[in-house]
Image (spheres, rainbow, N blue to C red):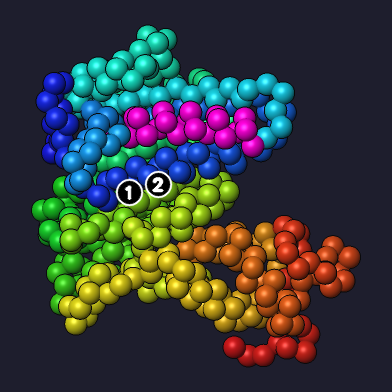
Amino acid sequence: MSHYAWRWGSPPPPVKRHSEVKHALLRNYLIQYFLTLVSMPSQDRIKLTIVDGFCGGGLYINESGQEVPGSPLVILDAIREAAFLIQTKQDRRKPIDLDVELICIDKSKSALDYLKRLLEDRNYGAALAAGKIQLVRGDFADHCGAAIQRAKDRSKIAGRAIFVLDQYGYARVPVTCLRDIFATLGHAEVILTFYIDALISYLNEANLAGFEQATGIRGGMTAAEIDDMKKSPKWRVHLQSSLYQSLTSQCSAKFYTPFFVRPERGHGDFWLLHLSQHWKARDVMATTHWEHSNHFAHYGRAGFHMFSTGYITKIDSTDQLQSGFDFSDVAATVSQDTMLEQIPAMLFEATDGLTFEQFFMQLINTTPATRTMVEEALLALNERKEIQVLGLDGEESRARVHLKADHVLRLPKQGRFNF
């Protein structure tokens, strides 16, 4: 059950700062989503279904005593702002029609009653009456199939939908729902929170069995393996890595950003998983994380292969806090320097070279870097003559600012050292 309670006429429930940050990231991501999607002024309509699987009452009180919007209002405000930016930034002869249907699901009747009153109070009554905003009571897992079908009916060819699944805890989104989303909808995305610290801290045989039964995620760890692992000072590293690999491998998404929301005052880390079938969506989300650098992290390495040894948990083998990778300006510099060191060695085995597209696509899920950051590292190495960038004609390219997808990357013939 939710730990929030809403009653019209009473103050809305309090919200922690990290939840505000999640909502800010959601808002910014949705705006960038639309700006990226509507790249041509000739486009005049986009059909999209957004499913808010744990919507709540839509309003909170933050730690400063101010009212702040919950996810339904955040989503609706982002749609309005995106439409305005598209119209003003592009040379358009007619307005863009962002044909978005919002499905809000929550188990709490009082939360949905409050949300309905709130939306009517914020001038969304007509959208409610027209079915552009739908309020559905129940568990997300029970209504997932109907939401997928609705998104499919509205976008039969593209299958365009975003599922915002800010669950309470870690066991309310079955992996079967995730698989059905990606199997049915070709352009679906999922933004999923997962309270990893709560699961890790209290994981035992009984909790593991309950987690597997609720989510359908199998093969993370057996009870015996957990017992053996806890004898190691780095057991959290291995356990988090195993759970992450199990979740991402079983959800059927091709691309993902497994970064952490980093709460203040030790409330515990949340995964904020973005799952999608298209690299560009993943890249937009990674870019958004960099824009919110003070509140997001991953406890792995800079550059590529960030999780090659599993997650580096907040507590290391000596029980000391680690700062982690924090998406700061310093982290950006470290990422750039690390990629400059790693790339030549990674091209060593590719005797015929790799296209920029091939190189980036095989590494996209292993790095906090965006496509632009990877491109900048490659261009810097090319400028230093440590790698070569070739055009389709096999001749060295003069590219200095941008790489094309079919540019070929390889080591100079005389520079093939044994790394």
Q: Is residue 112 above or below residue 2?
A: above
Q: Nearer the viewer, residue 392 or 22?
A: 22
The C terminus: image quadrant: bottom right
**Magenta span includes 403:** no
Q: Position of residue 15 (x, y in %)?
A: 20, 42
- Is residue 195 among the parts visible in the rendering? yes
Q: Is residue 40 above or below residue 122?
A: below
Q: Position of residue 401 (x, y in %)?
A: 73, 64
The label number, if any, that marks residue 337 in the structure image: none
Q: What amino acid type should be assigned to the residue bearing mark 2?
A: Leu
Q: Main secondary structure of the magenta part?
A: helix
Q: Is residue 406 above or below residue 227?
A: above
Q: Toward which corner of the image does residue 172 lie, by quadrant?
A: top left
Q: Nearer the viewer, residue 379 or 301?
A: 379
**Magenta span includes 81:** yes
**Residue range of the region highlighted in magenta in the rendering:** 70-89
- How many other residues sit within 10 Å of disc 2, few (<14), some (14-19) or many (≥20)? many
SS label for mark 2 = helix
Which residue in the protein does label 2 denote? Answer: 25
Give the distance between the C-alpha atoms of the residues marked 1 and 2, in whole angstroms.
6 Å
Residue at (64, 68) in percent of width and height: 376
In the drawing, does residue 123 fall left or right of residue 398?
left
In the drawing, does residue 176 fall left or right of residue 404?
left
Which residue in the protein does label 1 denote? Answer: 21
Residue at (12, 25) in percent of width and height: 10
Q: Are marks 1 and 2 in contact (CB under 8 Å)?
A: yes
